[in-house]
Image (spheres, rainbow, N blue to C red):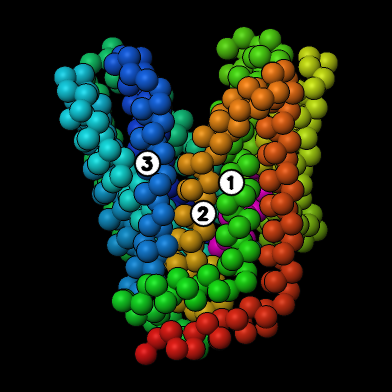
Amino acid sequence: MAHTHAFGWLQVFRLGLIQACLGAVVVVTTSTLNRIMVVELALPALLPGLLVGLHYGVQMVRPRMGFGADAGGRCSPWMMGGMVVLALGGLLASTGTVLMSDSLGAGLLLSMLAFMLIGFGVSACGTSLLVLMAKRLPDAIRAPAATTVWMMMIFGFAVTAITVGKLIDPYSPARLLMVTAGLCLCVVVLTGACLWRLEGQAGSIHAHGLDRPQAGAFKATLKQVWSEPQAKAFTLFVFLSMLAYSSQDLILEPFAGAIFGMSPGQTTQLSGLQHAAVLMGMLTVAFAGSSRVRGRLGSVQAWMVGGCLASALAMAGLCMAGLEGASWPLKLNVVLLGVANGAFSIAAIATMMRLANEGAGGREGTRMGLWGAAQAVAFGLGGVLGTAVSDLARWLIGDIGSAYAAVFALEALMFAISAWCAVRVSRLAKHPKLTHAHTRQSLQGSYP
């Protein structure tokens, strides 16, 4: 077995820079180009929404990307290749947006290709980054490391949005293309620098007595991973929790405006308060999972279950807000929701990295890809589900407050079921013999 050293905080910082680069390209395509299509080009808001949905749909290939890293034994080539594809997609997306002003059909076709490339790039780079963290991070720093990497991605969002916003003002198509091209070049160069001698050479990975999967055995490997009780239960948890998490995004501000009479500025501040609370929840779990206090503030699994239950409670509170109206303490409720969301999401990422190493060896990337695909599908459906159910409830019920209450009640139920799935994952972790028995049975006859 080739020697591989555990990552420390310097390597975590380098991976965080790559995640920030990934977020930098994505935020331009999902926010800046979104605004240009709707405002400058006066196109329907549905158009950028469908393009973003396309980029999520393409991420169904994540398991195949993760399998590629498993079969090759290295994650770095997939991360570098994914970033190059992502940068190309970002540049083509800007080009397609500019082209729409002259030819809507040609611009739309180019944008569709661009957003597909963005989805492929995010899948290859993001999945392999998580796999590398799962393989090389000591268990003692997984929660704080996950928080660090995700905070750096959020930092990338913020810095890129502010910088690009200033550079393209006053707006012109040529300026947009120039700024996007510069950004894409920078992220590729920075990613290459961060990956330089980070992973080392490929080595044979022997876990549970099994070698890496053969290059042509993707279907058999995916079937084997799906047969693992832990992997299946965690996939359901990721899908339901992320669906509930994402379906509230597009309806919270309209809800606050319609029921509480908040102005656009006030609802924006409310959204900012929620994001700050999410960060607070992330930092809390990072502290609880650190080596200094490890176990004294509860396990990572306990925070995952508790975060989902607290999220369900907060959603139930918003349900009451829809029924009670302006007398309900909305800001306090939103802070509770944000802290709970941040806590369960970081705990889930840390758990994901741990579970990727359990079961048959050499399948870490396939497992991570499966969970990444579940998350992408949930995020793609979340925005549509939240707004569609809200409109349907308003049409069926008539009263707007009761309609929003019905939607929040559904999301509370999804969080509660997510907590049950998280409990099941924890129980299976305490009975590894059951998981390994399923693994051995599924491997019989799968490979020559």
Identity, as a three-letter code, of the amino acid under mark 3 = Leu
Q: x%, y% of residue 209?
A: 50, 88
Depth check: give the residue in front, 256 or 127.
Answer: 256
User: Alpha-carbon neighbours of circle 3 within 10 Å: few (<14), some, or many (≥20)?
Assistant: some
Q: Which residue is mark 1?
A: 242
| Image quadrant in which you'd find residue 222 | bottom left
Q: x%, y% of residue 432?
A: 67, 79
Q: If you read the primary sequence from the N terminus, does the residue marked by circle 2 or circle 3 appear first? A: 3
Q: x%, y% of residue 286?
A: 65, 50
Q: If you read the primary sequence from the N terminus, does the residue marked by circle 3 or circle 1 appear first? A: 3
Q: Is residue 364 above or below residue 85?
A: below
Image: magenta residue range: 342-353
Q: Which residue is mark 3?
A: 54
Identity, as a three-letter code, of the amino acid under mark 2 = Ala
Residue at image coords 58%, 12%: 264
Q: Is residue 406 above or below residue 259?
A: below
- Which secondary structure class fits the magenta region best? helix
